[in-house]
Image (cartoon, helix red, strand yellow):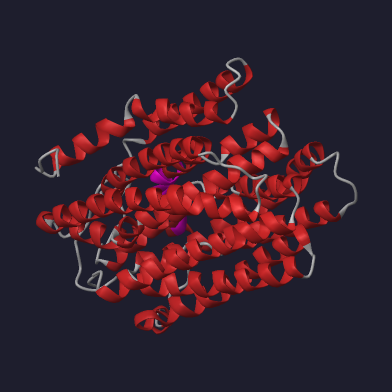
Amino acid sequence: MEVKVNRSDIIWSYLGVIVSFTASIITLPIVIYYLDADTVGLWYVFNSVGAITILFDFGFSVTFARNINYCWSGASKLEKKGQGGDILNEPDFLLMRNILYTCKRIYLILSSLALLLMLTIGTVYILHISSHISGHTHIIAWIIFSVAAFLNLYFNYYDSFLRGVGAVKRANQNRIFARSVQLLLVIVSLTLGFGLLGLSISYLVFGIVFQTLGNRYFYSYQNIRQQLNRITRKVNTKEVKELFRTIWYNAWRDGLVSLSIYLSGQASVIICSLYLSLSETGTYSVGLQIANVVAIFSATLYTTYQPALQHNWIKKNMDEVRRIMRLIVLTYIITFFTGSIAVITVGLPILKLIRPEVIISTELMAGLFISQFIIQFRNCYTSYFSCTNRLDYMPHFVFASVLTIILSIVFIQWGNMKTWGLIIAQIISQCIFNIWYWPIKAHREMHQPVVL
């Protein structure tokens, strides 16, 4: 099947990011207004600890999306590295059925393990940092949040499936609707005074809606359900095991990449909560969230064009690959700097009016923007290599993330640099290698001038 990115896909991709962006813009001041500083910090710790569940995905979402795209593009066989087998005119639905079967069972195991750890070790950690908060409501909220994280991890495969077959529009429609429902519940629950409990319940409902619509959108896309139902042959356990071994070759590498991204970003919130107050953690977390929103919005085309980039590489259409990469990188740079200036000149003054005690200085916000720009800029280029089924950048990502953690602790504990220690650690660890090597390597491989 042909995988193309049309105007509708691009529009819905931007709408998806805009809705998420709007949800964050609306949620942020409401959370700050209705919750005290410690509770705001605790909520962002919830999110940072909950983000660990993404690590239990261990790269399978990226790997499955990539392999489903190979299958949808006509590959008759999956290879551990690169491309192998004949390229057919139609998808091999038997191979796709086996991929889907393998995926669902793997995700059930991973998400169950994540839930177990969140309800045990995670609960102990939350009790430790919130020992000064009276009552048990925040613990109940944490338990609900853990169940919600389980559902979001388990059913995340629908997003991978949709993007793998090029249904970018459907994937974004699913996320937009689910996020809109969550936003509505957040507003209502906080207004009614449910606090952390309301935020956790809203997150739980998001996962339920996302799963329900994801199932419907995927199986109705280009008659996939009918095509799969035509396969009468039973699932062969030996074939599934062989498929798992092939997928696992890159899945654990993708997993380590996910781990390194977490350690370079969200883990800084946990470090902050261990060495600084919950109030300071809340301020840093709000700034990091704002920088992440700008980075994600700026990288929208990068996410949208992933299936098309991979499809054209499979078809050896390098002119189109070069065109897509130029579009991705230039759009990212222009959009990021425009968004950063808008936040610093307009967003921060508005935030100060809403809650004067949550002060994010211009210098701190600029530092967060620089660190997030570097990370996403690096990802724009490493996406090219992941699309070609090569994850040679994995060891360098892991090294940079470990260095980030070490430098963060050193700068905070012995350098007394507080939140600036976290930012500088991120910048230094990426500038050593990743920020310059992968762009140069990608440009050389595509026979493209290093300067766009």
Q: Is residue 112 above or below residue 258?
A: below
For the N terminus, give its image quadrant: bottom left
Choose top left, top right, bottom left or bottom right for residue 377.
top left
Q: Quadrant of residue 449?
A: top left
User: Is residue 245 found inside the magenta-colored segment of the image?
Assistant: yes
* Residue span colored magenta: 240-252
Given the current orientation, which residue lies at the most extreme right position? 135
Residue visible at 43% across and 70% down in the picture? 172
Q: Position of residue 192 (x, y in %)?
A: 78, 70
Q: Can you give x and y, in whole percent of width and height, for residue 13 in the image?
A: 37, 67
Q: Position of residue 250 (x, y in %)?
A: 39, 44
Answer whether residue 408 is visible to the viewer in this image: yes
- Residue 280 location, x and y as percent? 66, 37
Label total for image: 0
- Reply above or below: 200 against 419: below
In the rendered view, does 342 fall on the left or right side of 48? left
Quarter of the image with the C terminus is: top left
Examine the rendered structure and indicate whether residue 203 appears above or below residue 12: above
Q: Is residue 339 left or right of residue 148?
A: left
Residue 237 lies in the magenta-colored region: no
- Work out whether residue 101 can be spotted: no
Q: Is residue 132 left or right of residue 418?
A: right
Q: Residue at x 43, y 46 (%)?
A: 251
